[in-house]
Image (tube, rainbow, N blue to C red):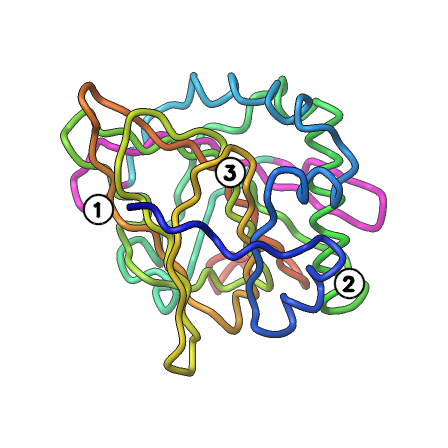
Amino acid sequence: MNLPPPLTAPEQLAAALRDPGHAVLDPAGLCRTIGAPVAALQALQPCWDALPPDNHLRDGGRYRRRRHSCFVVDGDEVRLVPHRAHWQPIEYNALHGGLERWFEPIDPALGDAPAWSKLLRGLAAACTAAKGARRWFVEAHQFRIDTSDGIGRPTPEGAHRDGVDFVAVILVARVGIKGGETRVFEADGPRGIRFTLTEPWTTLMLDDERVLHETTPIQPIGDAGHRDTLVLTFRSGGFQGPPAQGG
């Protein structure tokens, strides 16, 4: 049985990010937050149908496809930056930390869509409302987790933080699967919640300094299925990078 997520009204988003450090917007709430209709978001979904394989999975799996690009959001300005590797310290990602992972960039058909810039700008504004005005360094990850091998792992590293200020996990599609339960835990406390994202464009936002998150494995219902997500991370002060290169 899928547990429904506890929903937050858009006008309460900043307060929820401050305490308890997480919030879920339903699709209508996301659209109100970013100022775009759900049809404009749905028009982006085909961009998940041509993701190349993730060749960096240290567990030997073949269940993940992805693209990755980086942006800077400064007030109303959204700017694509030169393509760069995704890097996390091992303290935040025990499985893949310490590696420079290069992925194919996001297709221009997605990055140039008006709804894309509204999405980044609107969620960055929510981060600013929660933590104060600043320039946001945004990493955008398109994921498809499939069950062609019988099981897919959305977070093979387990419960984790990403080493950023805020994280947005946006469900784009869920096709022919079971499982995929989202779990959010206090980083320094006993409390946690669990639920399943089922409706496209439902959005989980997290204060990455205060909570851990993970998603349980997925299995197919009948033929092979998949789960598509967009993960956006918002960090002030620069992008993460190996210590010798700075952020």
The amino acid on which the numbered mark 3 sits, given as a three-letter code, is Leu
The secondary structure type at the circle numbered 1 is loop
| Label drawn at residue 176 | none
Q: Is residue 59 magenta?
A: yes
Above/below status of 61 relative to 11: above
Q: Which one is in front, 148 or 101?
A: 148
**Residue 193 falls in image quadrant:** bottom left
Q: Which residue is mark 2?
A: 129
Q: Which residue is mark 1?
A: 58
Marks 2/3: CA–CA distance: 22 Å
| Residue 117 horizontal side relative to residue 195, left or right | right
Q: How many marks?
A: 3
Tell me the crowding category of disc 1: few under 14, some 14 to 19, or many 20 or more residues within 10 angstroms, Cα based: few
**Residue 98 falls in image quadrant:** bottom left
Above/below status of 243 relative to 27: below
The amino acid on which the numbered mark 2 sits, given as a three-letter code, is Ala
**Residue 40 falls in image quadrant:** top right
Marks 3/1: CA–CA distance: 21 Å
> Residue 229 placed where, x, y %?
46, 36
What's the residue at 39%, 70% (across, down)? 192
Which of the marked residues, 2 or 3, is nearer the chain's N terminus? 2
Q: Which residue is mark 3?
A: 230
| Residue 56 horizontal side relative to residue 193, left or right | left
Tell me the crowding category of disc 3: few under 14, some 14 to 19, or many 20 or more residues within 10 angstroms, Cα based: many
The secondary structure type at the circle numbered 2 is helix
**In the rendered structure, which segment of residues is drawn in magenta?**
57-82
> Residue 56 placed where, x, y %?
29, 40
What's the residue at 69%, 35% (across, down)? 80
| Residue 196 horizontal side relative to residue 74, left or right | left
Q: Is residue 88 magenta?
A: no
The amino acid on which the numbered mark 1 sits, given as a three-letter code, is Arg
Which of the marked residues, 3 or 1, is nearer the chain's N terminus? 1
